[in-house]
Image (spheres, rainbow, N blue to C red):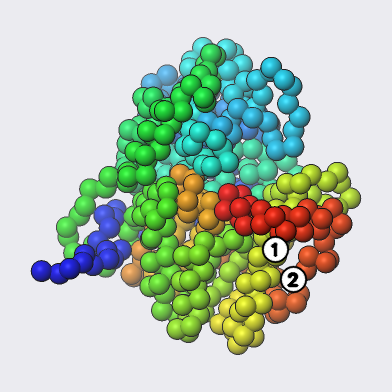
Amino acid sequence: MPLFKPKPTFNDFAAIPLGSQAIQILHSAAAFRVALLDQIANARKRIYLCSLYLQNDAAGQLILDALYTAKRNNPNVDIQIFVDWHRAQRGLIGEKTIPGKQMGNAAWYQTQSTLHQYSIPIFGVPVQTRELFGVLHLKGSVIDDTVLYTGASVNDVYLHYAEKYRYDRYWLIQQADLADCMVDWMRHHFIGSPSVHRLDQASLPTTKTIRKEIRASRDQLKKTQYVVQRNQDRADLTSLRVTPIVGMGKGNRLNRSICQLLASAKYQIVICTPYFNFPREMTREVNRALARGVKVRIIVGDKTANDFYIPPDQVFKPIACLPYLYEMNLRRFAKNHQYDITSGGLEICLWKDAEHTYHLKGVWIDQLYTLVTGNNLNPRAFRLDLENALLFTDPRGELIERRDAELAEIMVHTQTIASYKKIERLQDYPPQVKRVLQRLSRTRLDMLAYRVL
């Protein structure tokens, strides 16, 4: 008998067969906003929206109004909204709060619920007892039998409902089995959970009073996976298919799958991440890929395209140091791999488009695998947050033209870095940023920041 169990391959994961015509890839936030509104307006049986947050702004109001209109026009449509518990009950980062007064989107949800005849539940899902140590970062909304998968939340910038946009990925997959699988998972783990409460209703419990329930829920979520009807027909392994994966906590299945994807690459890897801060497991697999001759392209946002970036001429806030912290990390990585950059094995591309921001995540492996995810591919995502992804396996190349078109669109606003010396150093940063980062480095708090931010 073997002394160990062999590692599973992707062929061992339960997958759902797809027709290539079932997939639509959109290339802009504005196009996604139009598609989302159209899907809501035409929903017949269910609308399950899952997002980090639904913001109290013009775009958030637009979507919430559309949902209430859909419910009024068709009272039988099942509408459920899931957002992060902590994020919904605080103001924006840097926003002043009023002592004793509820802040955040939850108050808006409650006000809106009083204006309409029909009720739309908005659930707050706590992943951890404190936001710093874990949030609901699960992606993928379901409208009837269509899965709308994006890393975007709902606000003016993510939906390009104002001057600026935040660029993400936008996939629409029309597949009833996949939609059922994701809805069943949300219903089982969110609706009725003792830790999950409706934010659209008054008299919310405090986080302190439900700590025990939150911890129990977190323990359960660490062990869970999507339930997919396994198809034993080996012929399916030769056609296009999708595998939904969920994960939370160290060493979870999603983390392992990402690393396994990188390890499986034979000639090309493309990685998108908004915050350059790979977990050690990913860094190790990228290094190994480069060593075996795989070409690696990393597309990351310029520091000015980071959603935390504040121009030097505006009022400084400590959170504005984060984009510089990530850039320092990128510079170290590029310096360590300057030989690979020079030889053409490694390509580092910085995305920048005026004052717009960048929020893309994902992995492309050879011409076989495409991972669409909200996972930031950083230590926080690998350890703390509740994450998921859709893995598309394409043996016949049915998606190549569309996935190449998506990549080409992403590359339009990128600049390739020829040398690590082209990336700014600490000495080049604004004085206030430099002081904070030097203080963090002296106290080793920069390493903690890399793990939780």
Q: Position of residue 435 (x, y in %)?
A: 82, 55
Residue for point 49% across, 39% down:
136
Q: Nearer the viewer, residue 447 or 261?
A: 447
> Distance of mark 2 from mark 1, alpha carbons?
8 Å
Residue for point 56% across, 37% down:
131
Residue 423, numbered label: 2
Q: Secondary structure at mark 1?
A: helix
Q: Quadrant of residue 130?
A: top right
Three-letter code, disc 1: Glu
Residue that carries the numbered disc 1 in the rendered image: 327
The reply to whether residue 267 is in sight is yes
Q: Nearer the viewer, residue 62 or 388?
A: 388
Q: Residue furthest right?
A: 313
Q: Secondary structure at mark 2?
A: loop
Q: Position of residue 179 (x, y in %)?
A: 36, 42
Residue 144, numbered label: none
**Contact, mark 2 vs mark 1 (Cβ under 8 Å):** yes
